[in-house]
Image: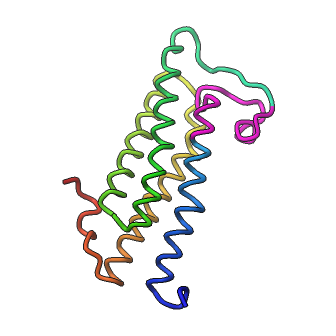
Amino acid sequence: MLPRHAEGQFALAGYALACGFFLPMAAMLAMAAIFGFPFVEASDGIHGFLSGSGSYRSQLNAGTLAVGPALTLVMLLLAACHLPLAWWVLERDWRRAGTVLRVAAASMATLAMVTCCAALNAAALLLPFAALTVELAVVGALARFEVEQFGGEAGEDFGTIS
C-alpha cells in the first residue's frame, strides 16, 4: 500500500535518496580524504583511490606541504555533512537540511580556493562539486514538493538561517 499513496512515495523517495546517494557519498568522500584526495594523485585515477591500486604521488611541494592536513580536514568535513543530511531528509527537517547543505557548499568553496591557491589540479574537484549541486537541487525540490503536496511547514525556512 505504501507506494500507491503520495505520502508513501515521498517517504520511499527520501529513503532511496538517503541510503542510495547521501550515505555512499559520505563513505566515498571519507575514503578519498583518508587516501589524500585532492593533493595526492593516483596513477589509476578515481578507480585507484577507491580500490587502493596503482601508485600514489603527492602534488604538494615544499612550499605547500603545510596545506595537506587542512585539505584533509575540509574533505572530512564535507564527508561528515552527508550523515546528518541523510537523517534530516528522512525526518523532513528542511531547515536543518538547508543549513548542513550550506556548510557543505562552504567547505566545497574553501576546498576549491585552497586547491587553486596551492596550485593543485582543481579539475579533480569537479565530481564532488557536481554531486553537491545535485544534492542541493534534489533536497530543494523535495522540500518544495512537500510544501505543495502535503502543506509542510518549513517551506519558507529552507533558504534562511535563523
Is 150 located above or below residue 96 in the figure? below
Determine the residue positioned at 65% across, 20% down: 58
Q: How many marks?
A: 0
Q: Would you identify the image quadrant in which residue 42 lies?
A: top right
Determine the residue positioned at 52% across, 73% down: 13
Q: Residue 43: within the magenta?
A: yes
Q: Percent position (x, y) of residue 77?
A: 45, 38
**Highlighted magenta segment, given as a residue range:** 30-53
Using the image as rendered, state which of residue 38 and residue 77 is in the foreground: 77
Q: Percent position (x, y) of residue 57?
A: 70, 21
| Name of the residue lying farthest toward the top | 62
Is 129 located above or below residue 87 in the figure? above
Using the image as rendered, state which of residue 111 and residue 150 is in the foreground: 150
Q: Would you identify the image quadrant in which residue 65 lies?
A: top right
| Name of the residue lying farthest toward the left | 162
**Image quarter in which the N terminus is found:** bottom right
Using the image as rendered, state which of residue 74 and residue 131 is in the foreground: 74
**Image quarter in which the C terminus is found:** bottom left
On screen, residue 43 versus residue 77, left or right, reads right
Q: Percent position (x, y) of residue 142?
A: 41, 71
Q: Percent position (x, y) of residue 115?
A: 50, 28
On screen, residue 156 versus residue 148, left or right, reads left
